[in-house]
Image (spheres, rainbow, N blue to C red):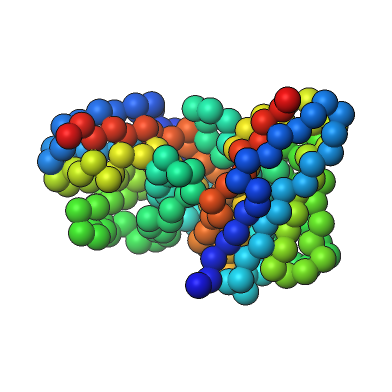
Amino acid sequence: DGGITQSPKYLFRKEGQNVTLSCEQNLNHDAMYWYRQDPGQGLRLIYYSQIVNDFQKGDIAEGYSVSREKKESFPLTVTSAQKNPTAFYLCASSMGRGGAETQYFGPGTRLLVL
Amino acid sequence: AQKVTQAQTEISVVEKEDVTLDCVYETRDTTYYLFWYKQPPSGELVFLIRRNSFDEQNEISGRYSWNFQKSTSSFNFTITASQVVDSAVYFCALSEALVFGNEKLTFGTGTRLTIIP
């Protein structure tokens, strides 16, 4: 089955700790995205990547980092610089580049701070 | 800058009633795409429809229908004969960049729909 997987489903972070969220897709999509969702709000773009070894900052990139070493993988690291990391994180991918392409989403990771 | 407004924060209807979710957008581009996604309690966003700015035909898919009106910058979503499984948060989204390197999907804040059995 083709799709997007995210792990873990729940993640707990201690103060000062970096944590990494996994996102993998087997849809052969070029573009991948990370969004953050806070309660009662829409999704906000953190980072996106249109091709391997290249990525761009979204609207709320501060305190986050990403890498794109493989086409199918786009991990997100929440660093200690992110002071309010508690949120629901969604990964998405799309076939190509440009605003016309539909983004498909993974099941999400819920990050909680201990 | 692009913006999407979903003024209805929460809606509750009794099962089998029809319900319309409103979406109003702002963009300066003449070419753009509009989307609707469903987010059930599990959290995953499920794609429902994509519509480009040049196609104002209404679309129907089973119990779902969409009314796109450029004159009022609206892209409303109607569920006919609602069912409990329709309970979810629904997001409207806008993408205006067709140029490589600047694509961005802007989401509304969502409408939480509860279908009462």
Where residue B47 sits, quadrant-wise, is bottom left
Q: Nearer the viewer, residue A58 or A29?
A: A29
- Answer with left or right where residue B12 lies relative to residue A53: left
Q: Nearer the viewer, residue B22 or B14?
A: B14
**Up/down of B112 relative to A105, above or below:** above
Where residue B72 sits, quadrant-wise, is top left
Q: Position of residue A75 (x, y in %)?
A: 75, 54
**Up/down of A26 relative to B113, above or below:** below
Q: State whether residue A90 appears in this view.
A: yes
Residue at (61% x, 71% y) in the render = A26
Residue at (72% x, 63% y) in the render = A73
Residue at (85% x, 34% y) in the render = A17
**Up/down of A19 relative to A31, above or below:** above
**Up/down of A63 relative to A52, above or below:** above
- Answer with left or right where residue A11 lies relative to residue A41: right
Q: State whether residue B71 appears in this view.
A: no
Quarter of the figure with the C terminus of chain A: top right
- Answer with left or right where residue A89 lies relative to residue A105: right
Q: How many marks?
A: 0
Q: Nearer the viewer, residue B70 or A42?
A: A42
Q: Position of residue A52 (x, y in %)?
A: 78, 68
Q: Position of residue B27 (x, y in %)?
A: 51, 43
Q: Position of residue B43 (x, y in %)?
A: 48, 43
Residue at (72% x, 48% y) in the render = A21
